Amino acid sequence: MIRYLIKNNFKLMFRNTWSVAVMLLGPILVIAVLSSAFSELMKSYEGVDEFTVGYRIQEATETNVMIETAKVAREEAGILFYEYPEGEIKDIMEKNGLAGFVEFLDDTYVVYKSADYEVEGITLEYFMNKVMNAGVNVSLQLQEQTDIVLPVEELEFMPAVDSIDYYGIIYIVYFCWCGMICATGVLSNEKKYGIVRRFQVSNISESQNFLGKFIPITLTVTVGMAIATVITVLLYDIHWGNPLLSMFIVFMMIIAGNALGMMLYNISDSLVITIIIQFTIVWFMGFFGGSFETYMFSSISDTLKHLSPIYHGNRALIELSCMGESNYVTSAVLYSVAITVVCSMIAILAGYIRKRGRT
């Protein structure tokens, strides 16, 4: 009997082709627009090439120590220092096209930056700050040292993700949670032709009735998301890390989203209310989970982020894409399983109560 229900509900779903088309074309169009719109925001920083700066020193022992320190470190930093003992600093910078100028005084220094070389100026300022701090620490040892080793600290970081990869992944996730839109053909036709009343006098259990809708909806959304993913990969060269694991995470979220939708429908008994409530819930989960503002740049508290299943899914998939592994895979799957189980049980119970109330 359940096979008959699944087959019949597939037919009802594809009578409403616009809802299926929305699930297929929606992510493709949104990914195209947002990945382009936010490409500059997520562009990776690129280091500057070698550049030239001038300097001037006074005859002072401590200042000589500082400039010697800078000369040793400059080769690694890609900064060329040329001495200009005389002349107006502004005129020297303009005439020689210098990115900056350093004036060494008795016990300190002054950095001049050119407005035409903003990034180089920031680099020079940072360089001088770090090198001079190191120079003070080694000033008593310079007479004996031939090499100066600057302190290096290694930090853990996530490799850069460009906007195409980011939005190409997270909007597949977002639309997974909106899969109930594919059920409009089934649920609207049930009301239109009085199919629900026929089920009430049949020997179909509420769990069979639930699975008869849940399975075709899930399969339809899964196929639609698979097609959308393949198209976006071919069009935009989106990089999915660990494809099998990524597909499993996406599939689990499709199941969770459909279970949530079925629960809302069996409670409200209204397709309109179901769509409104589910889309509102998904919007807030996406807002906290990085669907609109990237979770890397988001100022929302971590507590709110971790309450959103979309955050766990997004973070797991993005980290799989750029690092090949993620600590959020387990939480993303467990979150989806918990939502699926709880919402399915409530949906079946609500359907059973409504059926008993109508008989």
Image (tube, grey):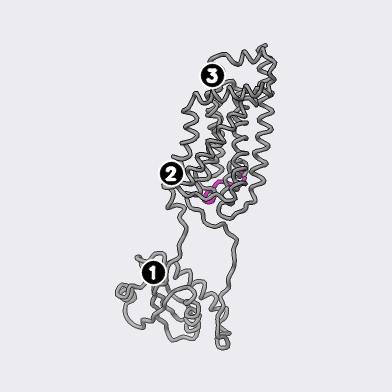
Q: Amino acid at mark 2?
A: Ala
Residue bearing mark 1: 113
Q: What residue is rendered at 62% in x and 28% in y? A: 214
**Image location (x, y in percent) of residue 80:** 42, 77
Q: Which mark is residue 189?
A: 3
Q: Which residues are magenta?
A: 296-304
Q: Which is more toward the observer, 303 or 163?
A: 163
Q: Earlier in the sequence, mark 2 or mark 1?
A: 2
Q: Earlier in the sequence, mark 2 or mark 3?
A: 2
Q: What residue is rendered at 57% in x and 45% in y? A: 314
Real-space CA distance between mark 2 and mark 3, rounded to the nearest whole angstrom:
34 Å
User: Is 249 on the left-hand or right-hand side of 38?
Assistant: right
Inspect the magenta stretch and tell me whether residue 347 lies in it. no
Dot 1: element: strand
Residue bearing mark 2: 32
Real-space CA distance between mark 2 and mark 1, rounded to the nearest whole angstrom:
39 Å
